[in-house]
């Protein structure tokens, strides 16, 4: 059986998108990546695939409909995958407008232009065309009982999660209204190499490496589920190629649910083994507690029975193993994150809603 081979994706210079680019290239796909190279993208993230003739890059915003409209018939994708988004909750609290622009208007533009392109395809081409939108567990809001299934109602609480929820609903409506072949994935918190140092795990690793305090929001008891990024992109490719059209799939980590404070302690304990501090004290001594994020959801959790049963996908990376790989990567690839710090990212506390 031959599978379609051309993927038009967005946000491929970001954290998860860059892992997806590498996976698709390793599987023989042609990839066109549209990315605006915002602060969250690092030009060197995809350095290792420079010169790969199956990879094509276009610099631009997903909300630029003239650009998107011109790219689709030129590249002739079989699949469109939308990763591009503003992704940091703290930034959404301080500057929500950019989140509406990129996450709502941008997602709408990619979706709507893809539908116009789809309408020009032949019957056979239409049969294999698929549009996948990447979303988050945060759309469901805080979880008090059993982990949410795909049909749980949406209850987002930050400007970030509500912008993602809005896009999910618009994407779903295109299946119901136009039978446009969409899929949606909602995943939990990712971690792994190449994650921008504003997110919890890379922030803690880099601050520990620099012997700086490790600030935990509030009491640190908030619970998240942690998904190793390489497990995640494999799940995305599976949904893209085998998922049932019009459906949503949850994706989560292997026993990844834990409190933020536990995550930071595991980072400290692993670093104590891998790279002991010069003063022989544990990295745990660097932990401090700072003012909590306003409206901080207490717990996110997803049930992944559906993707396990229907698509035979399960996460394979245990948190301790993924964390060891991640810490080693940040130790061995200082050049990557030091370049981000020297170009002006200051890792200052933001998102206090003042
Ligand atoms: N990181 C996570 O833990 C996580 C969890 C759940 C869902 N998600 C979703 O996965 C997707 C990817 O997340 P990530 O962590 O890799 O993001 P990221 O912040 O690391 O990267 C985002 C990428 O998108 C690009 N981008 C942003 N706005 C754009 C626009 N308007 N037009 C074109 N390019 C634009 C940026 O330049 C960057 O390369 C997002 O849709 C996010 O909501 C992420």
Image (tube, helix red, strand yellow):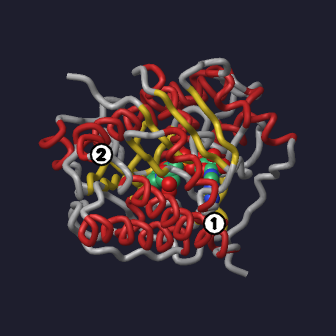
Question: Would you identify the image quadrant in which residue 186 lies?
Answer: bottom left
**Above or below for 233 versus 114:** above
Residue beneath disc 2: 122
| Residue 218 appearing in the image | yes
Which label lies toward us, 1 or 2? 2
Disc ID at residue 221? none
The kind of secondary structure element at disc 1 is: helix
**Residue at 32% over, 58% down:** 301
Question: Would you identify the image quadrant in which residue 242 lies?
Answer: top left
Task: Pinpoint residue 174: horizontal percent, then vertical percent.
Answer: 32, 67
Residue beneath disc 1: 90
Question: Would you identify the image quadrant in which residue 78 lies?
Answer: top left
**Above or below for 168 versus 71:** below
**Residue at 43% over, 36% down:** 228
Number of residues whose C-alpha sits closer than 10 Å to that of mark 2, classed few (under 14), some (14–19) or many (20 or more): few
Number of residues whose C-alpha sits closer than 10 Å to that of mark 1, classed few (under 14), some (14–19) or many (20 or more): many
**Residue at 48% over, 28% down:** 30
| Residue 223 appearing in the image | no
Left or right of residue 123: residue 99? right
Report whether the residue tagged 2 is closer than 8 Å to ligand 1: no
């Amino acid at each position: 059986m031959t599978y379609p081979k051309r993927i038009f994706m967005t946000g491929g210079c970001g954290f998860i998108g860059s892992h997806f680019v590498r996976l698709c290239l390793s599987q023989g796909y042609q990839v066109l990546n549209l990315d605006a190279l915002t602060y969250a993208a690092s030009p060197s993230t995809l350095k290792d695939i420079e010169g790969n003739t199956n990879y094509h890059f276009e610099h631009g915003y997903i909300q630029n409909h003239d650009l998107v409209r011109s790219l689709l018939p030129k590249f002739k994708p079989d699949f469109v995958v939308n990763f591009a988004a503003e992704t940091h909750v703290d930034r959404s609290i301080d500057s929500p407008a950019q989140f509406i622009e990129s996450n709502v208007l941008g997602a709408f533009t990619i979706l709507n232009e893809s539908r116009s392109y789809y309408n020009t395809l032949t019957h056979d081409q239409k049969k294999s065309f698929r549009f996948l939108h990447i979303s988050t567990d945060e759309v469901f809001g805080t979880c008090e009982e059993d982990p949410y299934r795909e049909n749980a109602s949406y209850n987002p609480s930050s400007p970030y999660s509500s912008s993602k929820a809005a896009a999910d609903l618009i994407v779903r409506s295109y299946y119901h209204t136009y039978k446009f072949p969409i899929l949606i994935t909602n995943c939990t918190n990712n971690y792994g190499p190449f994650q921008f140092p504003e997110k919890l795990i890379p922030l803690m690793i880099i601050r520990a490496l620099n012997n700086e305090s490790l600030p935990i929001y509030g009491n640190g008891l908030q619970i998240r589920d942690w998904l190793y990024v390489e497990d995640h992109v494999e799940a995305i490719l599976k949904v893209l190629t085998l998922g049932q059209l019009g459906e949503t799939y949850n994706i989560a980590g292997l026993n990844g649910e834990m409190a933020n404070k536990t995550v930071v302690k595991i980072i400290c304990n692993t670093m104590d083994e891998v790279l002991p501090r010069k003063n022989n004290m544990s990295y745990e001594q660097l932990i401090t507690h700072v003012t909590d994020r306003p409206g901080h959801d207490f717990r996110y959790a997803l049930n992944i029975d559906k993707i396990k049963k229907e698509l035979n996908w399960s996460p394979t990376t245990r948190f301790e193993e993924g964390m060891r790989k991640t810490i080693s990567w940040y130790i061995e690839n200082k050049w990557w994150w030091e370049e981000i710090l020297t170009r002006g990212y200051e890792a200052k506390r933001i998102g206090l809603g003042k």
